Image (cartoon, grey):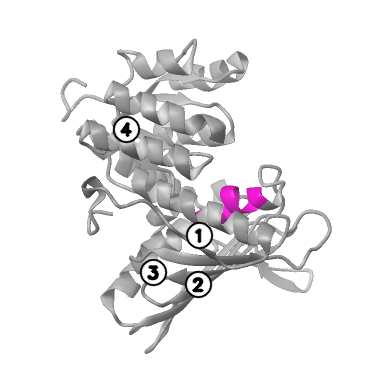
């Protein structure tokens, strides 16, 4: 990697869709000390459109990009079914990787990534659970950890999209959208989910919205409402209820207007706009750690646990009953306290 103090981190990006394109824009405009040197997408023209303005080149394949001497670290923003294999390839190459969620399509595939990392003896995979880097969520986490809320009893979550083509099935809503809350709740409470129930008021057609009840190992409960076709915009809320107080995310719109007799604020149109600061902080933290040869964020184990809970959630939705969440034994590489 060269001089880890002064050399720019040379980043290869796999996937030139909306998420990959946003990561390239953020790296090139808001994360000093990084350079996008390679981009791969099955659509070569789209890869070229993304690579050229960033000063990078188009790779012939994802494997070529990962193995390139011009790439120090990799961002995986390709379709979900490719994540696990590409993450394992990055581990084999000894290169830090930021893998967009989910880490894998199945918990078994996610465990395969974990096992590859454990065999190598060091953490190289960071999963793109960017809410941990959002200023609001970070402050909420600090408030919970401080103890001022007393013992946490309930966490309420709302996750709404104006529309979604990527979560177009009932299971897809859980594995593609709700999976953020499945990670966030565990992180906020520094606890693990041991049971889940998922229901929808829609009996015919796409079961949207969905309401989940999560049971935590420490006894707290969490509700998660996910509505991927809410129509009005992108809206995320979270409230933590304790024995001595509550804490909530507070929307901070830049401008409030009064026009034609109506007072209001604009609702973000999508997650990229809503979590712009979170993505910037996430990439900056990842780049700092990758420059030193590692990662510092949501781990492959966190990605695996989210996959395990998501699979139980799908079973709960389809079967109409509460499902226990049972995971493998946590390896020492991911000891608690180093989450």
As helix, strand or loop, the secondary structure at mark 1 comes to helix
Q: How many marks?
A: 4
Looking at the image, which residue sits at the far right? Answer: 204
- Along the polypeptide, which appears first: circle 1 or circle 3? 3
- What is the quadrant of residue 285 in the picture? top left
Answer whether residue 209 is magenta in the image.
Answer: no
For the stretch drawn in magenta, what is the main secondary structure?
helix
Which mark is drawn over residue 140? 3
The residue where tag 2 is placed is 222
- Along the polypeptide, which appears first: circle 3 or circle 4? 4
Looking at the image, which residue sits at the far top? Answer: 60
- Along the polypeptide, which appears first: circle 4 or circle 2? 4
Q: Is residue 196 visible?
A: yes
Q: Nearer the viewer, residue 171 or 140?
A: 171
Position in image of residue 80 (x %, y %)? 55, 35
Nearer to us of marks 4 and 2 is 4
Q: CA distance from mark 4 to mark 1?
A: 26 Å
The residue where tag 4 is placed is 116
As helix, strand or loop, the secondary structure at mark 4 comes to helix
Query: Magenta segment range?
Result: 171-180
């Amino acid at each position: 990697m060269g001089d880890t103090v002064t050399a720019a981190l040379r980043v290869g990006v796999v996937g030139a869709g909306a998420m990959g394109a946003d990561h390239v824009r953020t790296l090139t405009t808001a994360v000093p000390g990084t350079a996008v040197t390679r981009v791969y997408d099955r659509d070569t023209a789209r890869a070229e459109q993304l690579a050229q303005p960033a000063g990078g080149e188009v790779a012939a394949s994802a494997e070529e990009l990962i193995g390139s001497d011009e790439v120090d670290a990799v961002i995986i923003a390709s379709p979900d079914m490719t994540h696990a294999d590409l993450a394992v390839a990055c581990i084999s190459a000894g290169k830090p990787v930021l893998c967009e969620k989910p880490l894998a399509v199945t918990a078994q595939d996610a465990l395969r990534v974990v096992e590859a990392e454990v065999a190598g003896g060091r953490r190289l995979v960071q999963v793109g659970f960017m809410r941990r880097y959002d200023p609001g969520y970070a402050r909420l986490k600090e408030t919970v950890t401080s103890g001022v809320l007393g013992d946490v009893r309930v966490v309420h979550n709302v996750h709404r999209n104006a529309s979604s083509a990527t979560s177009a099935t009932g299971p897809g809503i859980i594995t593609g959208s709700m999976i953020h809350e499945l990670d966030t709740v565990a992180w906020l409470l520094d606890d693990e989910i041991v049971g889940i129930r998922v229901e929808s008021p829609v009996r015919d057609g796409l079961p949207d919205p969905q309401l989940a009840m999560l049971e935590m190992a420490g006894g707290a409960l969490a509700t998660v409402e996910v509505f991927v076709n809410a129509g009005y915009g992108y809206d995320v809320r979270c409230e933590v209820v304790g024995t001595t107080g509550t804490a909530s995310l507070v929307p901070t719109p830049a401008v409030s207007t009064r026009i034609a007799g109506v007072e209001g604020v604009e609702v973000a149109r999508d997650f990229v706009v809503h979590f712009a600061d979170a993505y910037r902080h996430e990439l900056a933290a990842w780049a700092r750690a990758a420059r030193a040869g590692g990662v510092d964020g949501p781990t492959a184990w966190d990605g695996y646990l989210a996959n395990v809970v998501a699979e139980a959630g799908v079973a709960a939705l389809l079967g109409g009953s509460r499902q226990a969440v049972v995971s493998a034994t946590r390896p020492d590489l991911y000891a608690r306290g180093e989450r």
